[in-house]
């Protein structure tokens, strides 16, 4: 009797493994095989957009053209400048009653090249870089890096660059000082050990075979010219970045974790996209999946969530259906799908344990994010969170609530506030991550599956 009253009245945290079936554990393993493959193919937003497009095409989605009037059941998508994706399955109710929208992002912290990157010093060739997003700089030195991106030549043709991903590819690296000579360096606060201007990447050390000047720089350019038909000026019109080398890996004897670069936020992007493409038949309400760019630098720019590109697509859809876009927004609801900070027992000082998500506890529903008194948070309405709670509990989706660490310890935001600004009810949800923004982030397989199930469930809201 006293156990029943505890169950009824108290909110107790339980580990996911104690709440799911053996079949769920197997399902998580299977789902994560596809997720790891996606991670390996999608190390930049462009690659993620391309991989997402392939998944959409395979699932029968067609590129939306302005003027189309998609009927219930129609599957359409659009790609924003190769960097962001929006896809929709039109519901039986049409667009008048709004849509259930998921919004994840496909950009991740990384090391971008400067416009004039190449220089030589002391018989070595380097690239100057300008990091992208919030990184702890010391984590990015002495690890193998891959180079990804595009270079656009003067005639407008494009070279797609990808070096370091194949087994026999070379990789690149930022050096660090040997401990023997680091007595002074190790006294510095971690945030100042490496400055942005220190993050210079070694790209060569064999001189061009002549006795002229700039032989190391010339040697690198000669190899790039040979492989990609580019010159040093083409760096001025390029988007190149270094990302951690290597594939997604299982972590732990039990393989219950996934370790990989860029899980923030592909761990929400892939499951939400899969939930959309796996929709059976014609859903009641229209389902929309957004994979946005530029979240890590404030959702800025023409491909970020603040861009009207997203509105243009949705408003065009509405126009085709004779629905006013503002009415569509008013009746829509959005899951802002982005990672949360999993409780890390190695750093208990940074978390309020009672209000932190645990790995293998399921997806984290965040009523609000933000920093310093919820600044910049969207702060979902209790009624909206309750609607989610209803469908998640109905469908057996493991979920937990949580904040991003202790109050006033820092904080962070998501795209939520930009969706909410469009008069769309928005709730933050995501997979708890350990070592967020590090070159090798950790997630739990059960939580990844639950992100998929949460999106599935949400599309029935
Ligand atoms: Mn994120
Ligand atoms: Mn992030």
Image (tube, rainbow, N blue to C red):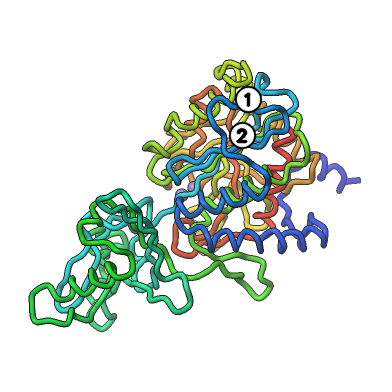
Residue of label 1: 69
Q: Is residue 270 visible?
A: yes
Q: Is mark 2 within 8 Å of ligand 1?
A: no
* Helix, strand or loop status at disc 2: strand
- How far from the left and from the top, in percent, is residue 389? 72, 36
The local secondary structure at tag 1 comes to loop
Mark 1 vs ligand 1: CB below 8 Å: no
The one nearer the camera, 436 or 197, is 197
Q: Find residue 62 and report its horizontal and vertical position in percent.
A: 61, 40
Residue 303 drawn at (x, y percent): 42, 39
Q: Is residue 125 left or right of residue 383?
A: left
What residue sits 67% from the left and 57% below the top? 360
Q: Residue at x 53, y 69 (%)?
A: 247
Picture residue at 43% right of the left edge, 47% below the top: 409
Image coords of residue 113 (percent x, y): 29, 58
**Badge number at residue 101:** 2
Decide: few, some or many residues near mark 1? Use Cα within 10 Å; few <14, some 14-19, many ≥20.
Answer: some
Q: Which mark is residue 363?
A: none
Foreground disc of the pair 2, 1:
1
Q: Residue at x 76, y 36 (%)?
A: 391
In which quarter of the view is residue 344 placed?
Answer: bottom right
Q: Quadrant of the C terminus?
A: top right
């Amino acid at each position: 009797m006293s156990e029943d009253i505890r169950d009824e009245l108290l909110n107790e945290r339980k580990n996911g493994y104690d709440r799911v079936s053996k079949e769920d554990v197997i399902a998580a393993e299977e789902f994560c095989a596809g997720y790891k493959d996606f991670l390996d193919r999608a190390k930049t937003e462009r690659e993620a957009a391309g991989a997402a497009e392939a998944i959409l095409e395979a699932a029968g989605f067609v590129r939306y053209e302005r003027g189309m009037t998609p009927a219930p059941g129609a599957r359409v998508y659009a790609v924003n400048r190769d960097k962001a994706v929006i896809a929709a399955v039109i519901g039986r109710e049409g667009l008048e009653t709004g849509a259930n929208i998921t919004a994840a992002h496909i950009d991740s912290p990384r090391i971008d090249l400067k416009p004039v990157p190449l220089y030589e010093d002391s018989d070595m060739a380097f690239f100057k870089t300008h990091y992208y997003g919030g990184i702890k700089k010391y984590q990015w030195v002495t690890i193998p890096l891959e180079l990804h991106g595009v270079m656009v030549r003067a005639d407008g043709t494009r070279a797609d660059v990808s070096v370091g991903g194949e087994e026999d590819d070379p990789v690149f690296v930022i050096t660090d000082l040997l401990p023997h000579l680091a007595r002074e360096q190790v006294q510095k606060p971690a945030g100042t050990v490496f400055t942005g201007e220190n993050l210079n990447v070694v790209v060569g050390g064999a001189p061009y075979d002549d006795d002229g000047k700039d032989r190391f720089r010339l040697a690198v350019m000669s190899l790039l010219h040979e492989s990609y038909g580019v010159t040093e000026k083409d760096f001025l019109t390029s988007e190149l970045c270094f990302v951690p080398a290597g594939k997604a890996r299982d972590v732990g004897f039990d393989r219950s974790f996934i370790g990989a670069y860029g899980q923030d936020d592909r761990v929400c992007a892939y499951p939400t996209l899969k939930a959309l493409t796996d929709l059976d038949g014609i859903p009641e309400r229209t389902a929309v999946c957004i994979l946005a760019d530029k979240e890590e630098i404030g959702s800025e720019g023409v491909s970020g969530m603040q861009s009207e590109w997203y509105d243009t697509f949705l408003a065009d859809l509405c126009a085709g259906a004779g629905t006013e876009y503002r009415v569509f927004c008013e009746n829509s609801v959005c899951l802002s799908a982005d990672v949360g900070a999993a409780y890390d027992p190695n750093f208990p000082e940074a978390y309020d344990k009672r209000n932190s998500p645990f790995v293998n506890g399921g997806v984290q529903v965040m009523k609000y994010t933000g920093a310093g008194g919820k600044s910049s948070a969207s702060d979902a309405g209790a009624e909206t969170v309750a609607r989610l709670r209803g469908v998640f509990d109905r469908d057996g989706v493991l979920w937990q609530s949580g904040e991003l660490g202790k109050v006033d310890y820092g904080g962070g935001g998501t795209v939520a506030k930009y969706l909410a600004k469009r008069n769309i009810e928005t709730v933050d949800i995501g997979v708890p991550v350990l070592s967020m923004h590090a070159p090798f982030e950790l997630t739990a397989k059960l939580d990844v599956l639950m992100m998929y199930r949460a999106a599935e469930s949400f599309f029935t809201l």
